[in-house]
Amino acid sequence: MTSFVSHTTVDCHDAYALSEWWKSLLGYVDVEDDPNEPGHDECTIVDPDSGHTILFIEVPDAQLPDKRIHFDLRPREGTRDEEVERVRGLGATEVADHRGEWGPGTGWVVFADPEGNQFCILRSTAEMEAPTPA
C-alpha cells in the first residue's frame, strides 16, 4: 500500500493574504463553494487544470521556521526569464540566481514570497526539450 499527496500545506501568519499572493503567481483559484475571505485562518487554493491544492494555515508561533516549504515552479507558457520578470513584478524577493551556472540555458532563480517562503523558477518544458545553446 502507498500514499499520495492530498494537498500541500504552508504554515503562515496571514492565510488569506498569502493565499491571494500565490493565486496571482500560480493562476490557482479558490475551492468552489468555499471562497477564501479576509480573517480566515485556513485558506485553500486549487490549480484549475491539475486539481493540485495548497492549504495556507495560520500558526500562532511568533517565529516561523525558515524553510516551511519549497516549490519548484515551471512556467506554463513562455520562458523562465519571462516568468522571472513577472514574479519580480508581483513583489517576490530574489534570493539567488543560478542561471547559466552549468552552461548556457541552464539553471533557475530562487525567490522568496512576502513571508519568506522560498521557491524556484525553472526553465519551461519547451526550454527543457529544446537543444542546448552553444
Image (spheres, grey):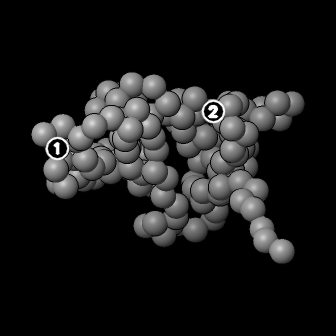
How far across and down, in percent of the image, does residue 109 sit? 30, 47
Name the residue nearer the viewer: 86 or 12.
86
Q: Dot 1 corresponds to which residue?
A: 104
Residue drawn at 83 percent across, 74 percent down = 1
How far across and down, in percent of the image, does residue 110 sit? 32, 51
Q: Is residue 134 left or right of residue 106?
A: left
**Which is more foreground, mark 1 or mark 2?**
1
How far across and down, in percent of the image, does residue 132 sit? 24, 41
Spatial CA distance of label 1 from label 2 is: 32 Å
Is residue 91 visible in this depiction of the protein? no
Look at the image and tell me in which quarter the C terminus lies: top left
Q: Secondary structure at mark 2?
A: loop
81 is higher (above) or lower (below) than 40: above
Q: Label 1 crowding class (10 Å Cα cut-off): few <14, some 14-19, many 20+?
A: few
Residue drawn at 58 percent across, 68 percent down = 61
Q: Secondary structure at mark 1?
A: loop
Q: Amino acid at mark 2?
A: Tyr
Residue drawn at 63 percent across, 33 percent down = 28
Instruction: Identify the image quadrant of residue 57.
Output: bottom right
68 is higher (above) or lower (below) than 31: below
Q: Dot 2 corresponds to which residue?
A: 28
Identify the residue at the far left of this view.
Answer: 134
Q: Earlier in the sequence, mark 1 or mark 2?
A: 2
Is residue 14 visible in this depiction of the protein? yes
Q: Label 2 crowding class (10 Å Cα cut-off): few <14, some 14-19, many 20+?
A: many
Instruction: Identify the image quadrant of residue 37.
Output: top right
Residue drawn at 63 percent across, 64 percent down = 60
How far across and down, in percent of the image, does residue 58 sit? 65, 56
